[in-house]
Image (cartoon, rainbow, N blue to C red):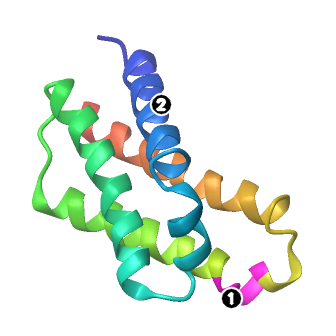
């Protein structure tokens, strides 16, 4: 399987977990409750790891922790909002940066998993 196809599969898993599997409740509450934030980050991490497993790519505990922690921090900063997110439109540049972080996670993961 080409790395481009693997990227597309992981991108689809990301979109599935970050939008329909998140739902309005998790989206609205993840900046107010750490358990809800962890639930969303766990769902997203699980979706990415399942996609990796289905592509016969080994997932290590370090991969799981890294995916979870980076996703949770990025989403927490956007949901609160903290730092530079305070000045950004949450459905404009804030959303673009958040999605960019998650896509960058996928690119980094694929880079070190396929070398």
Mark 1, other Cα within 10 Å: few <14 / some 14–19 / many ≥20: few
Q: Is residue 65 above or below residue 53?
A: below
Q: Residue at x 35, y 83 (%)?
A: 35
Q: Residue furthest front?
A: 25
Q: Residue 12 got which mark?
A: 2
x and y, in percent, of residue 28 in the image = 61, 73
Q: Residue at x 29, y 11 (%)?
A: 1
Residue 83 placement, left or right of 86: left
Report which residue position mark 1 lands on: 82
Q: Nearer the viewer, residue 110 or 40?
A: 40
Q: Secondary structure at mark 2?
A: helix
Q: Residue at x 37, y 39 (%)?
A: 111
State if disc 1 and disc 2 touch (CB < 8 Å). no
Q: Residue furthest top?
A: 1
Q: Quadrant of residue 56?
A: top left
Residue 12 placement, left or right of 67: right
Task: Tell whether position 82 is magenta.
Answer: yes
Is residue 115 visible in the rendered image? The answer is no
Q: Nearer the viewer, residue 88 or 20?
A: 20
x and y, in percent, of residue 69 in the image = 36, 73
Q: Nearer the viewer, residue 48 or 1?
A: 48
Is residue 12 visible in the rendered image? The answer is yes
Task: Tell whether position 109 is magenta.
Answer: no
Inter-mark Cα distance, 2 to 1:
28 Å
Highlighted range, magenta: 80-85
């Amino acid at each position: 399987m080409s790395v481009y196809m693997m990227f597309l599969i992981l991108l689809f898993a990301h979109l599935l977990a970050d939008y329909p599997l998140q739902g309005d409740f998790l989206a609205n509450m993840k900046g107010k409750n750490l358990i809800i934030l962890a639930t969303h980050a766990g769902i997203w991490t699980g979706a990415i790891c399942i996609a990796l497993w289905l592509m016969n790519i080994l997932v290590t505990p370090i991969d799981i922790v890294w995916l979870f922690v980076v996703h949770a921090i990025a989403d927490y900063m956007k949901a609160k909002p903290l730092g530079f997110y305070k000045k950004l439109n949450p459905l404009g540049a804030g959303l673009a940066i958040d999605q960019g972080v998650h896509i960058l996670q996928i690119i980094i993961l694929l880079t070190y998993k396929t070398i």
